[in-house]
Amino acid sequence: MATSLPTDMKYFDPLIQSGYTEKVTQMIDAFNAQSAGTLVFKTNRKPGDYDYTSFFKNAGGLVSRQDLTSVAGATPIKLTQEQIISVKLNRKIGPVDWARSALLKPGLDMDAIKFAAGEQAAADVLAEMLNSTLLAGVAALNNQSAVKFTVPNNGTLTTSSLVSGLSKFGDQAGRISAFVMHSKVFFDLFQYQVTPTNNGDLIANTTIVNGGPVTLNRPVLVTDSASLVKTQGSGSAATTDYLTLALTADALIAEETEEEYIVFDQITGNEQILMRMQGEYGYNLGVKGFKWDVQNGGKNPNAGALGTGSNWDAAFTSHKDFAGVIIQSR
């Protein structure tokens, strides 16, 4: 008699779910806090492949001199709307297979393995979300000359480089809340500042006492993400540049819009009983001041499309309303 058994069923494993949820919550809280609210990870269920938010563009010139000697008609100013568009990325977890005996022979606890698998999946999920979010931010800002500063003569990052980067925001530089940089850049800056001949004893001593570089009273999120590295050429002619982001509040947003779905399955019919974990989820990426180019970028873009600057179109009129500034150094 053909009878459905528990081994025929796919189901949520509570241990995997609890390990996954706990780890995700911890890491999201850490990133939101460490980035001073410039990199935001949140949850908000949304259907579709894109998320549209409309707003009224700044018309400019709403106030002008009134001519008290005339009753001629005035030229009306038109208010128009624009959109911010984020794009959804769909991702899978696994599948991961292992033989049941591979865990039981060494005396490992099955429940502990399931919990650990959930935690590991969560860590990889957040790492991928961070890298993709930074990739989108780099692509969008790097394509806007008004918010890009390149250190002259292929130089490394210095204190004055940070100042020059902030200057791109002019009178709105105070809105820059945090820096995101590669560890190579971080230590270049550190090394520069501990050399008294570069910045004088005051900054050098302050840097040594604090145990980290002076970053103009702004926190730094250091991550060795490949999204912050730009390599060109090959062989002896190859060059590697590093991209540092100076971000405003809510600059880059990763929004989990499709609930994670993780199943644990027992696979029979083989020489040994196999255990399988597989999952899927989706999230939207948004860059402050930009809209995803739906026509050219398309749905569920790969890394190449996501990292193409022309796929992120400026939506705000003023560059001072963008996500921030990008600084390129060698």
Image: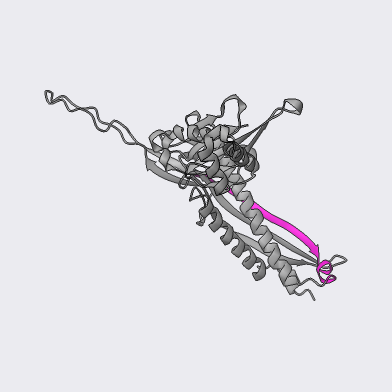
Name the colour scheme.
one colour
Q: Is residue 13 visible?
A: no
* Relative to 293, 58 lies left or right: left
* Relative to 229, 82 lies left or right: left
Furthest-bottom residue in view? Answer: 1
Q: Residue at x 66, y 69 (%)?
A: 15
In what quadrant of the picture does the C terminus appear?
Answer: top right
Q: Is residue 94 magenta?
A: yes
Q: Is residue 24 magenta?
A: no
Q: Position of residue 93 (x, y in %)?
A: 68, 56
Furthest-front residue in view? Answer: 201
Q: Nearer the viewer, residue 130 or 204?
A: 204
Q: Position of residue 38 (x, y in %)?
A: 49, 47
Judge whether 199 appears above or below 36 on screen.
above
Q: Nearer the viewer, residue 277 or 202?
A: 202
* Quarter where residue 182 is shown: top right
- The rendered magenta stretch, by its main secondary structure, is classed as strand
* Quarter where residue 26 is shown: bottom right
Q: Is residue 62 visible?
A: yes
Q: Position of residue 175 (x, y in %)?
A: 42, 42
Q: Position of residue 294 (x, y in %)?
A: 53, 39
Q: Which residues are magenta?
A: 86-106
* Relative to 96, 123 lies left or right: left
Judge whether 148 appears above or below 213 on screen.
above
Q: Residue at x 73, y 57 (%)?
A: 95
Q: Residue at x 74, y 69 (%)?
A: 8
In what quadrant of the picture does the N terminus appear?
Answer: bottom right
